[in-house]
């Protein structure tokens, strides 16, 4: 199962239509080709297989991030590693 974790836009490259996002401390690039809303630096988006799909409300994003962090904090190290490995498969690598 893939979870879409809210990601905050840090940079936008309009020429290539991509953005750099921060997902719980991890920076990555995402295409803006499939999003049908205007996005700006500081907005929160949901990413799926390298594409920004939806812009989400900041309050909702922060609440989701708080809940994800709570879940992670309560997991054992082995469970955390399994989640990381599964998330790598979600991106089509």
Image (spheres, rainbow, N blue to C red):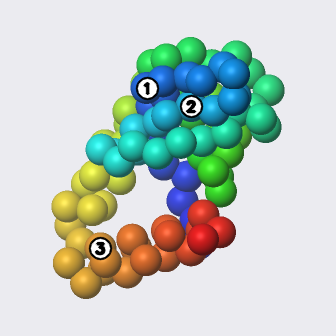
Sooner in the amino-acid sequence: mark 2 or mark 3: 2
- The reply to whether callout 2 and callout 1 are in contact (CB within 8 Å) is yes
| Residue 58 coordinates in the image, percent (x, y) | 46, 24
Looking at the rendered image, the quarter that the C terminus falls into is: bottom right
Task: Quadrant for residue 12, please give it.
Answer: top right
10 Å crowding of disc 1: few (<14), some (14-19), many (20+):
some
| Residue 75 coordinates in the image, percent (x, y) | 24, 72
Q: Secondary structure at mark 1?
A: strand
Name the one closer to the observer, 26 or 37. Answer: 26
Residue of label 3 = 80
Alpha carbon separation for disc pair 1 and 3: 26 Å
Q: Residue at x 60, y 41 (%)?
A: 30
Task: Quadrant for residue 65, please give it.
Answer: top left
Residue of label 1 = 10
Q: Secondary structure at mark 2?
A: strand
Sooner in the amino-acid sequence: mark 1 or mark 3: 1
Residue depth check, mark 1 versus mark 3: number of the one nearer the observer: 1
Visible residue check, residue 57: no
Residue of label 2 = 19
């Amino acid at each position: 199962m893939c979870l879409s974790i809210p990601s905050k836009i840090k940079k936008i490259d309009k020429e290539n239509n991509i953005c750099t996002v921060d997902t719980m401390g991890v920076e990555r690039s995402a295409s803006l080709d499939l999003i049908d809303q205007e996005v700006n630096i500081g907005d929160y988006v949901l990413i799926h297989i390298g594409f920004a799909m939806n812009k989400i409300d900041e309050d909702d994003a922060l609440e989701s991030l708080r809940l994800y962090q709570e879940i992670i904090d309560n997991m054992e190290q082995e469970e955390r590693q399994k989640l990381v490995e599964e998330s790598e498969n979600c991106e089509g690598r």
